[in-house]
Image (cartoon, rainbow, N blue to C red):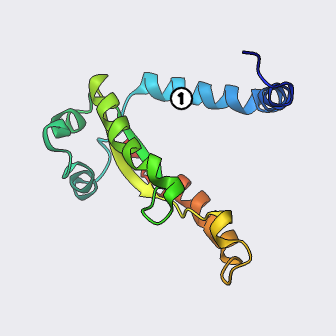
């Protein structure tokens, strides 16, 4: 089945427009992978909080041999459209374990649904929530833990 022409055109424009930033991102990810985890310089208290709930996987984190994926989610119980996302953190955790790593939910972001909030009192807060989203993705999960 052929891809819809409009979808294909938009996809190609996105690929072209993001080529430089994607290349930079991929280079940074390769470098981070080569350098490995950097957890040793975290304070004991910071490490304790990060590892306390990890159970059997804790030893790999402490020894700095396991990669750890930080999950940021917008899942919530309030919106039916979000229900499929409920299982994603567990799926990511299981997949990480199967490949010698670990994963933790590191933060959440506001999940404003235009279909629910459009025209309602409080809709002006969407801009504030969008800013919180960007802040959470940059600052919420402490990069040194992952």
Relative to 25, 81 lies left or right:
left
Q: Quadrant of the C terminus?
A: top left
Residue 22 picture location, percent across and down: 69, 30
Farthest front residue in view = 1
User: Quarter of the image containing the N terminus?
Assistant: top right
Q: Quadrant of residue 34?
A: top left
Residue 96 rendering spot, x and y as whole percentages: 33, 30
- Image quarter of residue 88: top left
Outermost left residue: 56
Q: Residue under label 1, please give it.
A: 29
Instruction: Describe the element under mark 1 as helix, strand or loop.
Output: helix
The residue depicted at 42 percent of the width and 62 percent of the height is 77
At which x and y percent is residue 62? 20, 39
Q: Quadrant of residue 120?
A: bottom right
Q: What residue sits 66% from the left and 72% below the top?
A: 117
Q: Name the foreground residue: 71 vs 68.
A: 71
Residue ID at (47%, 52%): 73
């Amino acid at each position: 089945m052929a891809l819809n022409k409009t979808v294909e055109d938009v996809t190609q424009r996105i690929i072209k427009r993001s080529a430089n930033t994607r290349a930079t991102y991929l280079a940074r990810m390769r470098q981070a992978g080569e350098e490995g985890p950097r957890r040793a310089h975290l304070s004991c208290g910071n490490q304790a909080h990060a590892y306390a709930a990890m159970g059997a996987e804790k030893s790999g984190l402490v020894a700095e041999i396991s990669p750890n994926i930080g999950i940021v989610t917008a899942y919530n119980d309030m919106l039916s459209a979000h229900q499929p996302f409920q299982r994603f953190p567990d799926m990511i955790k299981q997949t990480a374990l199967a490949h010698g790593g670990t994963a933790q939910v590191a933060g959440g972001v506001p999940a404003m649904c235009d279909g629910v909030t459009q025209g309602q009192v409080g809709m002006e807060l969407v801009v504030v929530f969008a800013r919180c989203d960007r802040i959470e993705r940059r600052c919420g999960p402490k990069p040194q833990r992952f």
